[in-house]
Amino acid sequence: MNAALSQDCGLPTPSQATNPDITPSAESILRIENLCVDYRTNTSGSRSSAKRTVDGLNLSVNQGEVFGFLGPNGAGKTTTMNVLLGFINATSGDAYLFGTTVREPIARQRIGYLPELTYYYKFLSAEELLRFYARIFKIPRAETERRIDQVLKLVELEHARKRQIKTYSKGMQQRVGLAQALINDPDLLILDEPTSGLDPIGRMKVREIIQRLKTEGKTVFFSSHELGEVETVCDRVAILDQGRLKLEGRVSDLAEQYRLSLEQLFLKVVGYSPSKPTHLPS
């Protein structure tokens, strides 16, 4: 967003996007500093060019927060998450989990992750899937069974724990994904579009789970296009567009300052204006 458009909308310019009240502190368990990510794209012949998908991102998430990471498709949200998870390396800048750079594998021992699209062995039951992931985390057998009972109760799948995952509805599969992300009792959960493709009841159940996790003191960092639910469950949000941070702040403060719903504010920040309806000839 350029400065003129920001002023027209009554919104801060990109240089003003970061709220000074949320600077990194000892409580920041996720911190991103001047993060840039370039992808090489093939052009004509053997030549290639770099496309910048994340551009100078600075962000801080504090312990116990539910943080909404927002932006249109292609804004750089999943790329940022992939850096945090160690799937890709940043071109420049850095990111930290619990004070340790994400370039070090140990930084990711205390996180749980749910991708937008889950791919599990559908012939396994929920119990079997969770035992598989517990072994990956080297959780002792007795502790594994206790954790399985606990997370299946949290995601309301106790009744279906012995059924094969291929018999689950889309909402149930998403909830078993959440159970998998929780099996190691993480302090930070990174969720990429956790309600994608769910019906209203499925979205409500996931929202309730996130709220329960917050009461347990977990930190949740998630992306979503469901702005109504983000407005309901999140403490703070950041809006990305074309790889750049455009706006960040507490949901309640933003609503009070701009007198707009989160959806209206989001549309202004990304520069969307609805087109006028066209009338078909009679």
Image (cartoon, helix red, strand yellow):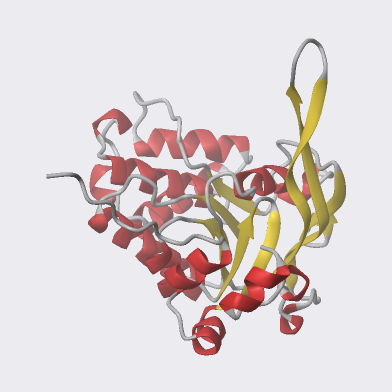
Nearest the camera: 97 or 4?
Answer: 4
Instruction: Name the image quarter holding residue 220.
Output: bottom right
Image height of 165 relative to 75, above or below? above
Nearest the camera: 100 or 47?
Answer: 47
Where residue 272 sits: x, y (%)?
Answer: 49, 60
Nearest the camera: 235 or 47?
Answer: 47
Q: Quadrant of the C terminus?
A: top left
Q: Residue at x 44, y 55 (%)?
A: 225
Total marks placed: 0
Q: Is residue 209 left or right of residue 282?
A: right
Query: Would residue 62 be visible to someone looking at this image?
Result: no
Q: Is residue 255 left or right of residue 162?
A: right
Q: Residue at x 60, y 73 (%)?
A: 64
Nearest the camera: 64 or 36?
Answer: 36
Query: Would residue 252 be visible to someone looking at this image?
Result: yes
Instruction: Name the image quarter holding residue 110.
Output: bottom right
Farthest-out residue, front = 281
Where residue 96 sits: x, y (%)?
Answer: 80, 57
Where residue 173 sits: x, y (%)?
Answer: 34, 40
Q: Residue at x 49, y 64 (%)?
A: 267
Q: Residue at x 82, y 62 (%)?
A: 99
Q: Is residue 190 left or right of residue 91?
A: left
Where residue 136 sits: x, y (%)?
Answer: 61, 35
